[in-house]
Amino acid sequence: MQYCNTINWDDIRLFLAVARAGTVSGAAEVLGVNQSTVSRRINTYEKSLDVRLFERLNTGYVLTPEGEVLLQHAERMEEESAAIERSIMGKNVALSGPIRVTAPLILVKYILMPAFVEFSKTHPDIELTIDVSNNLYNLTQREADVAIRVTRDLPPDNLIGRELGKAELGVYGEKKYLKKYLQQKIKQQHTPLHYIGEDNLFVRPHWLNEDSLPIKLAMRTNDVLVTLDAVKAGLGVGRLATFIGDVEHSLEKMNNVPHLPLVPVWMLSHPDMRQVSRINMFTQFISEKIKRHLSAMLGVNVTT
């Protein structure tokens, strides 16, 4: 492979995007540019190197052996570039500048927004960007500075993971629906309880595992907010975190259901970001707010 004398990092980023997406359209979406721009620049880059990096197939772009070699070098360059940026950021002691936070919408809506507002009012020179997503952002590449997640999975070894507390789960139904269900059950013992199930749940839900309880699937979804809306509309019962169900006045928590395991709430960041004053202050502030909120839901006192 013949390399040109000057390496353009923008060309490397473009190459990485196409290699990872496998299509020009996918890379264009990631980079926020037109497909024609990606295609043209990849062609120009190959000509400058005098080597073919991709095979153009009907199914997409596939790396050639030369492209595979370049991929290894490009990924190391990407990591070094990110490390330099984190190192420089780590020396920033100013309480101003941007902070990019990623968190699920359900957490933002029911727990985080009041804390975000309070933090922003207290520190107006810090610019918060809230990226509502369940995606696992690459904190090493600074796609986000802080990630807040509800998961039982342990954080990756290269990140700082702080468990802030545990979310309690319960089974909730709309009050009028539950009242009508109980009235019908008195008249007809085998009246089924309708439920909203998780998208990946194809068997009887464990949170309604009493074999003698007749149940009927009313809807299946992979989104908590859809479950919430369906439950509030009286379609059936669903599994929700208590920080959601307990504050929705139209809902009622069902008794006599199996005990549901608690789900940890994590805050993740890269170790190099600990020395950035604004991010360190933000993580401490938000951590305390989440801890207190979750502890209050569980009836546990928190001491600072």
Image (spheres, rainbow, N blue to C red):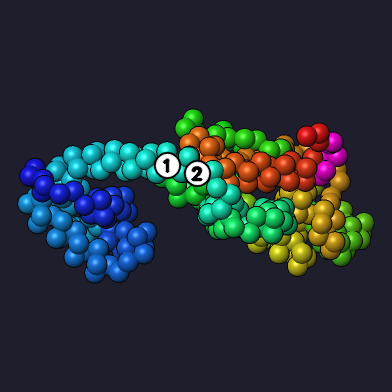
In the image, residue 35 lies at what x, y percent? 28, 67
Q: Quadrant of residue 76?
A: top left
Q: Residue at left 84%, top 63%?
A: 250
Marks 2 & 1, CB-CB < 8 Å contact: yes
Q: Which residue is mark 2?
A: 92
Q: Is residue 270 visible?
A: no
In the image, residue 216 lies at what x, y percent? 71, 56
Question: For the C terminus, which image quadrant?
Answer: top right
Q: Residue at left 15%, top 42%?
A: 65
Residue at the outermost front position: 94
Q: Residue at left 25%, top 51%?
A: 9
Q: Is residue 236 visible?
A: yes
Task: Identify which amino acid the numbered label 2 is placed on.
Answer: Asn
Going by the image, does 198 lie left or right of 64?
Answer: right
Secondary element type, mark 2: loop
Q: Which mark is residue 88?
A: 1
Secondary element type, mark 1: helix
Label 2 packing within 10 angstroms: few (<14), some (14-19), many (20+): some
Query: Is 104 inside the magenta-drawn segment?
Result: no
Question: For the N terminus, which image quadrant?
Answer: top left
Q: Which mark is residue 4?
A: none
Give the magenta-colored segment's residue range: 296-301
- In the rendered image, the vertical position of residue 72 relative to residue 39, given as above or below: above
Query: Is 298 inside the magenta-drawn segment?
Result: yes
Going by the image, does 150 lie left or right of 61?
Answer: right
Front residue of 270/157: it is: 270
